[in-house]
Image (cartoon, rainbow, N blue to C red):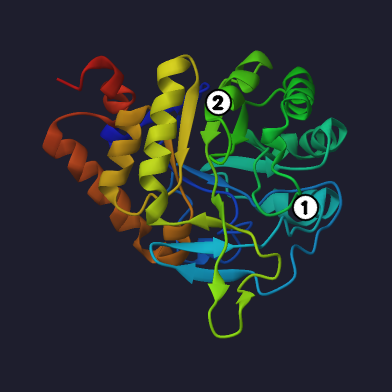
Amino acid sequence: MEKLKIEVAGIEFKNPIVIASGPAGFGDEFFKYVSPSTIGGFTTKTVTPQPKDGNPPPRLVYTKGGLLNSIGLQNPGVDTFVREVAPNLPKETVRIISIGGENAQDFLEVGQKVEEFADMIEINLSCPNVREGGTISSNKKLSSEILSACSHSLSKPLIAKLSPDGDILKQAEVALKNGIKIVNVGNSLQGAKFNINDGKPFLKRVVGGLSGPALLPITLWKVYQVKARFPQLEIIGLGGVNEPKDVLECAIAGASLVSMGTHAMNDPEGIDDFILKTEKLLEERKVSFKELVGCSHRGGYR
């Protein structure tokens, strides 16, 4: 699968398909259906300093073209993660550990504890259903403190996970100014759904994160904007990838890697075929994935 290979931050990915943080948890169930050697990378669920139970149920509701989730950052806490989970993360794929917290010290504590088990570390600034009053990425000062602390103290390649709910260019600029060279654009979008039979919200916290195919055009536009303004940034495109052609579109817009969440959760057994079909699309067009990255900014790939 030579046409799918790409190098990001000095790390070679056998293909650009990265499993997003969240839907596949820490991989326990997911890797019963998917060989880790098949995918380019795997991102863990976000790990925080202390254990979190997540949000109260109900936490999931399907919508047309997507899924609203209000799981929250449910996880066992960093100490349990390091002791029981991290040593078992498969080394046959690029291991991306997602970290979270409330302030710079939280992120730094988690990052330092998980670093030896990670190939890359994702700094989650954009969970849409945890904080009151917006995501961390909407707070320039707090984001800067977190990113600066991590970039000065952690040695593994860092990914800033940004939010499509806010000004993506301002967020990307903050990341770049604080030493980050890879950004994840983006996450699920905030949304809500209501029950017409009882007049109540479906989700206990009302707001959830919308994922699924409906998000793809938004993702493509956000990726395109960031690549146009900051061509030196490597971008992971996340949101709405549901078909092999979506992977090519993300690359054309400017994404070096393409993250898959809801689709991977709904059809993990189909990922092998998904990757094969993606390669076939490249072969039909006589281009490699690497050649497609950002080609819309260069007038196409011819």
| Numbered label tally | 2
In the image, what residue type sits under mark 2?
A: Ile
Answer few, some or many: residues within 10 Å of disc 2's Cα (few below 14, many 20 plus, some between 14 and 19).
Answer: many
Q: Which of 72 and 258 is in front in this view?
A: 72
What amino acid type is highlighted by mark number 1? Phe
Pick whichever, 124 or 222, lies toward us: 222
Indicate the position of residue 176 as horizontal and vertical percent values.
Answer: 61, 17
The quarter of the picture where residue 298 lies is top left
**Label number found at residue 81:** 1
- Helix, strand or loop at label 1? It is helix
Inter-mark Cα distance, 2 to 1: 24 Å
Q: Mark 2 points at which residue?
A: 182
Q: Is residue 110 left or right of residue 217?
A: right
Asked whether residue 119 appears in the rendered view, the answer is no
Residue positioned 55% across, 45% down in the render? 187
Q: In this view, does 34 lie above or below 78?
A: below
Question: Which part of the image, by quadrant, shows the N terminus?
Answer: top left
Q: Which of marks 2 and 1 is nearer the N terminus?
A: 1
Task: Note whether 199 is above or below 288 in the view shown.
Answer: below
Say which quarter of the image contains residue 278. top left
- Measured as percent of width and height from the top left, residue 216 is found at 38, 46
Is mark 2 in CB contact (under 8 Å) with mark 1? no
Judged from the image, the secondary structure of the residue bearing numbered disc 2 is strand
Residue at (28%, 48%) from the top-left corner? 244
| Percent x, y of residue 130 | 73, 53
Q: Residues within 10 Å of mark 1 (few under 14, many from 20)?
A: some
Residue at the (74%, 45%) spot, across then down: 133
Q: In this view, does 169 lie to the left or right of 203?
A: left
